[in-house]
Image (cartoon, coloured by chain):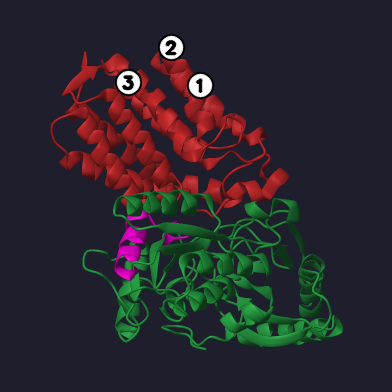
Amino acid sequence: MEFTTGDLKALFGAFSARMAAERDRLCVLDGAIGDADHGIAMEQGMKAAADAAQAAEDTLQDVFNAAAKGFLNAVGASSGPLYATALLRAGKAAGPRGSMPRTELRTVIAAMRDGIVQRGKVEPGQKTMLDAWGPAADAALDGQNADTIIAAARQGAEATRNMVATVGRAARLGERSLGHPDPGSISAAMLVEEICNAMKAA
Amino acid sequence: MSLTQKLINDGNAAVDEMLVGIMAAHPEHLWRPDNAPRAVVAKNGPRAGKVALVIGGGSGHEPTFLGYVGKGLADAAAIGNVFASPPPQPAVDAAMAASGDAGVLFMYGNYAGDVMNFDMAAELLEMEGIEARTVLTTDDIASAPLDQRQKRRGVAGNVFIFKAAGAAADMMMPLDEVERIARHANDRTFTMGVALSSCSLPQTRKPSFDLPVGEMEIGMGIHGEPGVRRGTLRSANDVADEIMDAILAEMKAPASERVAVLVNSLGATPLMELYILNARIAERLKAAGLVVHKTLVGPYCTSLDMAGASITIMHLDDELQRMIDHPCDCAMFRS
């Protein structure tokens, strides 16, 4: 079963709806260790990404590129460059074609992880969104099914509770960041879940 | 939980509506290029052969950043959403509008988001053949130990640090020299703050963090990031003493040297309390044998409606004193 540009536009619509629904919860999580605006950045960014994706034409890569630019220009912040780079890498992985097999959404997840590592210069265990994208990408590259990939992302996000932040805004808190999950990893697990739902739609 | 009371129309439109009001109030100082609503440029200041000083960051800190755009200080500012770095494009727009073909110096507080976005902007400018360098401000001494100074965040000390770099650029110094003075100013500027109540974002109108009555957060960041510790709210003198102890210990200024002082409100704390703090600060500096060359008191780098204050001391030398004394004429700051 093929994954088309129309499916990709619908996926960005799902990202946008999910972030809007979770906005306040993500802001509260961010308030504990950051500046309380993560939900706002993700809501605005994914809405702009979905709008830009809707207007894009032709190939999967075009849609990803338009979404990347839309997200970046709407929010800036740290999620802007990270997700813009992730989506550009995803576009490169999907390539200039009108559709791809749904199973290849696994390589999209891995490409997004690679983009985040490249732009954020982060490593696993630093209490960031990578701690959800990393396990999800590993599970995806391992050929695991959608539910296993979702579970890997969620467990990764949950594990950030026991991490001390060493990069980003929360890094200045040191030990005081313990016990709180990283909001960027929580929103990341939600996005992974939406991608995996699209994979299951076959 | 009840929503905090704000005079806004739409939380998501707050930054853009504020900018409309600022442009209406300061037409003699500021303009915006066409199709670049988040780039604010000085009317008087940018000129051929002059290094363009471009500052920027999230909104919610007014008069930081755009209030310091004007002759003798910054040439332009890139404006982000509330507490969020601007994306690369406004920084590129600001730099292009202010460029005098002598290079661009980006200056902003050291936050991961700002670094990624401004670095992307510098890459885009490179493609246009414009050299852009960066000096990050790291004046908040509570945000990391001295041996990790490069990890510290930039807060109210921005005012003095930007001022020094802006003066150097206005004196038509070359990019190397403006950059050197900017780094020197940052190295000699020390800030620490205390929060008494949370701010709330216009989009959520909920407190960003819980701070029980009777407590204060020492070393709080200017976005409501938790500080180094919670403590019982104490008197102005006790708070000034704790902060001055930390600053003086790190600054290690020999007696008879000069300093500039900034007593800054985080938004809701009134001038009365700032001046009470300053009485103690002046006393402490005198006891240390230091000479106060200049004092600024007021809301210079705020955190929306947060209650609290920060103290900044810049350790002057002849060069920095000359930069601080250089005249500037900005929309929200003149000296």
Residue to which mark 2 is pinned: A144
Residues under numbered marks 1 and 2 in contact, where contact means CB atoms less than 8 Å apart = yes
Tell me how far mark 2 sits from mark 3, CA to CA: 12 Å
Residue B7 position, x and y percent, is 40, 75
Query: What amino acid does circle 1 point to?
Result: Ala
B99 part of magenta stretch: yes
How busy is the neighbourhood of tag 1: few (under 14 within 10 Å), some, or many (20 plus)?
Answer: many
> The residue tagged with tag 3: helix, strand or loop?
helix
Q: Chain of mark 3?
A: A
Residue B274 position, x and y percent, is 66, 83
Q: Is residue A89 left or right of residue B256?
A: left
Chain B rendering hue: green
Residue to which mark 3 is pinned: A105
Q: Nearer the viewer, residue B264 or A158?
A: B264
Earlier in the chain: of badge 1 and badge 3, it is 3
> The residue tagged with tag 2: helix, strand or loop?
loop
Q: Is residue A62 left or right of residue A152?
A: left
Same-chain check, marks 1 and 2: yes
Residue at the spot x=60%, y=58% of the render? Answer: B153
Residue at the spot x=57%, y=32% of the render? Answer: A123
